[in-house]
Image: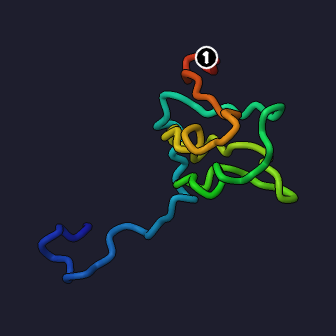
Amino acid sequence: MKKGWKELAIGTQITKPGSSEDFKTGDWRTERPIIDFDKCIHCLICWIYCPDSSIDVRDGKIASINYDFCKGCAICVEECPKDAITMHSEVEFEK
């Protein structure tokens, strides 16, 4: 039989520690950012400001957005100097 909370020693770990890599948080989004690569100059400003590290960079250029972790905050849209990123309703992408 498992112990009740009153029987546990102070500081007992009752769950395993986790990280954001363990929990995909992208499904919190109601809107998703879409990059227009014809406008993008790969300045990396969106990558710098993204609080979720959802902008993928390869060889010094923006490659994609990791929608598994992007929460749709639109900071990338606000910071893009070329208006290359726009927000679109998640409804557009439902299957």
In this view, the residue in front, 69 or 84, is 84
Residue 54 image offset from top left, x and y in percent: 63, 50
In this view, the residue in front, 26 or 73, is 73
Residue at the left extreme of this rendering = 6
User: Vertical placement of 56 versus 33: above or below?
Assistant: below
Horizontal relation, residue 71 to residue 60: left or right:
left
> What residue is rendered at 82% in x and 52% in y?
61
In this view, the residue in front, 88 or 86, is 86
Give the residue number, with chain letter if any, for mark 1: 92
Horizontal relation, residue 9 to residue 61: left or right:
left
Name the image quarter holding residue 85: top right
Image color mode: rainbow
Residue at the right extreme of this rendering = 59
> What residue is rendered at 62% in x and 58% in y?
48
User: Vertical placement of 86 versus 1: above or below?
Assistant: above
Q: Which quarter of the image is occupied by the N terminus?
A: bottom left
Q: Amino acid at mark 1?
A: Glu
Q: Which quarter of the image is occupied by the C terminus?
A: top right
**Numbered disc 1: secondary structure:** helix
Residue at the front extreme of this rendering = 81
User: Vertical placement of 55 versus 2: above or below?
Assistant: above
> What residue is rendered at 43% in x and 69% in y?
16
> What residue is rendered at 46% in x and 37% in y?
28
Neighbour tally class for label 1: few under 14, some 14-19, many 20 plus, Cα within 10 Å = few
Residue 5 image offset from top left, x and y in percent: 17, 69
Horizontal relation, residue 90 to residue 40: left or right:
left
Residue 51 image offset from top left, x and y in percent: 52, 55
Disc count in the image?
1
User: Vertical placement of 24 versus 7: above or below?
Assistant: above
